[in-house]
Image (cartoon, rainbow, N blue to C red):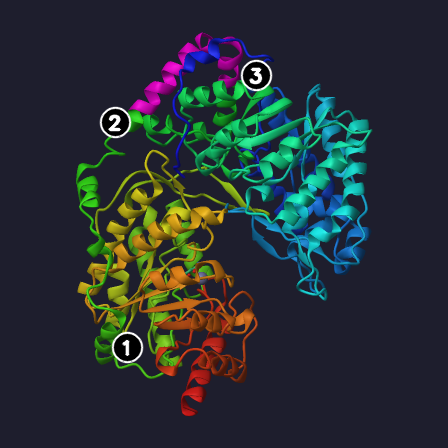
Amino acid sequence: MTAPQPARTAANRATTPPPAPVRATVYGYPRQGPDRELKKAIEGYWKGSVTAQALHETAAGLRRANWRQLTEAGLHEVPTGDFSYYDHVLDTTVMVGAVPERHREAVAADPLAGYFAMARGTQEAPPLEMTKWFDTNYHYLVPELGPDTVFKADSGKQTAELKEALALGLKSARPVLVGPVTYLLLAKPAPGVAPDFEPLTLLERLLPVYAEVLADLRAAGAQWVQLDEPALVQDRTDAELEAAAQAYQALGGLADRPRLLVASYFDRLGEALPVLAKAPVEGLALDFTGRAAGNLDALAAVGGLPGKRLVAGVIDGRNVWIDDYERSIATLATLLGLAARVDVAASCSLLHVPLDARAERRMDPQVARWLAFARQKVTEAVTLARGLSEGTGAIGAELAANRADLASRAASPLTHDKAVRARSAAVTEADTRRPLPFARRTAAQRSRLGLPPLPTTTIGSFPQTAELRAARAGLRAGRLDEAGYEERVAAEIREVVAFQEEAGLDVLVHGEPERSDMVQYFAEQLTGYLATRHGWVQSYGTRYVRPPILAGDVARERPMSVRWTKYAQSLTSRPVKGMLTGPVTMLAWSFVRDDQPVSETARQVALALRDEVCELEAAGTAVIQVDEPALRETLPLRAADRAGYLAWATAAFRLTTSGVRPDTRIHTHMCYAEFGDVIDAIAELDADAISLEAARSHMQVADELASHGYPREAGPGVYDIHSPRVPGVEEMAALLRKGLTAIPADRLWVNPDCGLKTRGWPETRAALENLVEAARTVRAEL
Ligand code: GLN
Ligand code: ZN
């Protein structure tokens, strides 16, 4: 994310010795180990092939190795307690004794098994709900609280991990906890509790538990404890800010406690900054990257943090690029005058980046030098701290190397493709608008396809079968050649098309068997994207993803999806829908370059996709779906930033889709049920139709669209694809009738909530047959 950075002031100001030595720290480190040892051990434990004891030993070994690595790299304080078997918010739930009723017995009987039961569910007890951690791609388990919740301190995990670190001689190990305000703001009402219950009302009850944990940590030897309050970088009400003030007044006022460092990240603190600056705590950690850069002026405006410690997150902790040392030194030099002690850190936990860029041995070494993963970021923090403490002369070699790497990136043909830049610069507003308005396009589209009212379709993917996965693994391992793999893909497409014809769906798909992932598939085919071999990042629990790295100018060298779409169309006389991933999602699920505005990167991706859209049309495709499931999730945390984001995001979508004839239908798709914040942006996409997740919320989204005057076609899902359950005909018909109260029959589509790739064939067949039958039933009532 690129946003205004503090002006480059004279870096040599840093040569005046700071009041206290500047040191380096981080808030958290990747948990999985260099070879994802943790994932393997946990999954082994689930299967019964790894004992609890062996799992604990593996985990302890990984923690030890991490701490050693961090200390050897020169970190002054290492974090403890950031490690987790599944999720740090779930760990906090255990720490405060807020285990949901339905899991209590299991947790009491066997804490480890019970812990995983809360995360994954059992036959008897569903898991905690999972949702995104702020605007990252990490998912946490949502605490469930109610007026009857009784908190009880369990500091066992935190004190044990602290003691492990102290036993290694790491005297300044610093426990990291989710802070009480953020914990409550992330919670939701427990099942059976009134939906308007506000967990924050439990603050007074929760604080004594934090007090007890802090006392335990102090007794165990902690000098500092970090309390993470990222929820305070979001827009907060006065009452919430008041709660934060009370919380830190109370915790700060405790007699028996370690020193407290309250950490914020992912954005600027805004109104929460004066609240925390005044609180009786010893230190604050602030993010100074991207959108959070405004923290610098805000900090000066409140008069700095006299007498306090400031941990300055100047290194981008959630992207993969090397730091600009001179810029960071300038920022840090300014900050030195604003606090009693300044330490250097990455802006957030390094959980959100891969472990080690040096492991990418197959990458062009020149390009690899532009990358800093967790390990490299630690070294950067240490180097900056040294430069500040000892004067920039002490890091002369590092500064020179950093300058050279940044220069090589800036001058590289990878980041500067003349043709791509010229084309992007020539884009006009008109290129982002379809020549005819929807009302006139729709007539042309209707006469081209002649669909019935309540037309039926799916979202794109069909079950990824064991044969298909085996074929893909075989291809990777060299057991299967390209031709053999393609024959497998073709066979899947034949099966998917034949089934859809039999079932009687109106607009068919090819089923996406050639795609293991909707972003990676296109990233691999576009120039400007890099793939990593070991760049794993935790998505949730033991699930890790390897996001592609969008490093350079983006161009499409050849058609990407046309061949399989054409093949599918050759098998049937019904229309086959083309299927692409939209520009916003192509960015959201990748690491994106930070050397130009994201809006420019989005425009390049949009132009490449636009060519694909036009080529699909030229191949005879009458319906083209451009998926944007990530539009909602990369919405900026603060409302003030949203209009700017939505403007470029919707423009990129329209640039992708506006090159087609009026009689070609553009569809889009989004998942997740909460659309409230983007409902107007959906209209701005100007897609002819949108499919949305709605089955679990009983078509509520149809009402929302209608009440916002959404003028085009919509397919609120009638089949919840997240479970193997097969919805009945009458159930889906009822949802359709409900949808019809908001959207007229000639604009209402009938489709599932999302793609079917995680489903099995038997339930998919049954559910889609029922879906077609439900559409027929309701059509007959029109
Ligand atoms: N077309 C994609 C699919 O069906 C959409 C996936 C998504 O929305 N996440 O799998
Ligand atoms: Zn979806």
Q: Quadrant of the C terminus?
A: bottom left
What residue appears at the point 37 percent right and 46 percent down from the top-left corner? Answer: 478
Q: Amino acid at mark 2?
A: Ala
Query: How much space separates mark 2 and mark 1, taking CA atoms?
Result: 50 Å
Q: Earlier in the sequence, mark 2 or mark 1?
A: 2
Name the quadrant where ligand 2 sits: bottom left
Residue 158 in the image: state x and y as whole percent: 73, 35
Query: How much space separates mark 2 and mark 3, taking CA atoms?
Result: 33 Å
Mark 1 lies on a secondary structure that is loop
- Tell which tag, 2 or 1, sits nearer the viewer: 2
Please identify the quarter of the rendering in which residue 579 is found.
bottom left
Q: Earlier in the sequence, mark 2 or mark 3?
A: 3
Q: Amino acid at mark 3?
A: Val
Residue 1 in the image: state x and y as whole percent: 41, 39
Query: How much space separates mark 3 and mark 1, taking CA atoms?
Result: 68 Å
Q: Is residue 44 visible?
A: no
Label 2 Cα neighbours within 10 Å, binned few <14 / some 14-19 / many ≥20: few
- Mark 1 — residue? 574
- Mark 3 — residue? 22
- The residue segment tinted magenta is 383-407
Decide: marks 2, 1 in contact (CB < 8 A)? no
- Mark 2 — residue? 411
Mark 3 lies on a secondary structure that is loop
